[in-house]
């Protein structure tokens, strides 16, 4: 499906219909997610011993492959135990830049039985790209990834 554009609803439904599991499923999910317009970097981080470890991703390579809890948008999500939607990353101090092109970001926690397993992180080049509607669908995706972790 490379090059096609997909709605977030179709991505989530497509992932839910997949027989894959584990890292293969996460890879597939990130490949589909990166085809949503404005989803310019899509990745999963796993939470391991107080650090977020970069898992499957689609987009430019990043130096931030291991992020301490509390640091950056990703680490803040875990420290505060809540999803993050950042309309304009230029207005944040506790932010780790992966690309100079990134202007907005959403982080949705992946939980199983209340335990945080990791997170979905998406960057956009557009200010204010992500809304509560994105969050709701990414939460559905996160629940499915958790069930096949
Ligand atoms: N911007 C994130 C770091 C991860 S990159 O966006 C891929 C942060 O501030 O935690």
Image: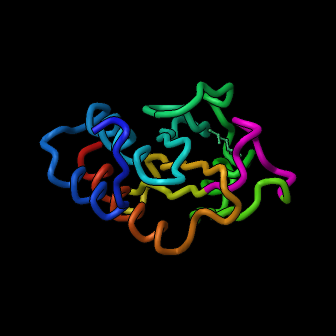
Tell how many labels: 0
The answer to whether any part of residue 34 appears in the image is yes
Viewport quadrant of the C terminus = top left
Viewport quadrant of the N terminus = top left
Q: In this view, does 63 lie to the left or right of 134?
A: right
Q: Quadrant of residue 20?
A: top left
Q: In this view, does 37 lie to the left or right of 32?
A: right
Q: Please name the residue shown 69% across and 52% down the image.
A: 73
Asked if the magenta segment contains residue 95, the reply would be: yes
Q: Give the range drawn in magenta.
A: 92-105
Q: Which colour scheme is used?
A: rainbow
Q: Is residue 82 left or right of residue 72?
A: left
Identify whether 75 is placed above or below 129. Answer: above
Q: Quadrant of residue 51?
A: top right
Residue positioned most to the bottom = 132
The picture places residue 57, in percent across and down from the top left corner, at 47, 34
Q: Is residue 20 left or right of residue 26?
A: left
Whereabouts is ligand 1, in terms of quadrant? Answer: top right
Q: Please name the residue shown 49% across and 56% down the image.
A: 109
The picture places residue 141, in percent across and down from the top left corner, at 34, 57
Asked if the magenta segment contains residue 93, the reply would be: yes
The picture places residue 86, in percent across and down from the top left corner, at 69, 62
Q: Please name the residue shown 47% across and 73% down the image.
A: 133
Q: Nearer the viewer, residue 114 or 45?
A: 45
Identify whether 27 is placed above or below 11. Answer: above
Q: Taken as a whole, is the magenta stretch helix, strand or loop?
A: loop
The picture places residue 11, in percent across and down from the top left corner, at 30, 54
The answer to whether any part of residue 112 appears in the image is no
């Amino acid at each position: 499906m490379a090059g096609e554009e997909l709605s977030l609803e179709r991505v989530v439904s497509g992932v839910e219909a997949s027989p894959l599991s584990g890292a293969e499923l996460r890879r597939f999910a990130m490949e589909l997610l990166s085809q949503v317009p404005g989803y310019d970097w899509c990745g999963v981080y796993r939470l391991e011993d107080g650090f977020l470890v970069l898992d499957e991703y689609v987009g430019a390579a990043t130096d931030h492959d291991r992020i301490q809890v509390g640091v950056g948008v990703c680490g803040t999500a875990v420290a505060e135990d809540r999803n993050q939607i950042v309309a304009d990353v230029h207005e944040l101090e506790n932010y780790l830049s992966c690309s100079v092109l990134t202007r907005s970001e959403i982080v949705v926690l992946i939980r199983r039985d209340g335990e945080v397993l990791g997170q979905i992180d998406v960057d956009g080049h557009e200010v204010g790209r992500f809304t509560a509607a994105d969050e709701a669908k990414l939460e559905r995706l996160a629940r499915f990834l958790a069930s096949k972790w």
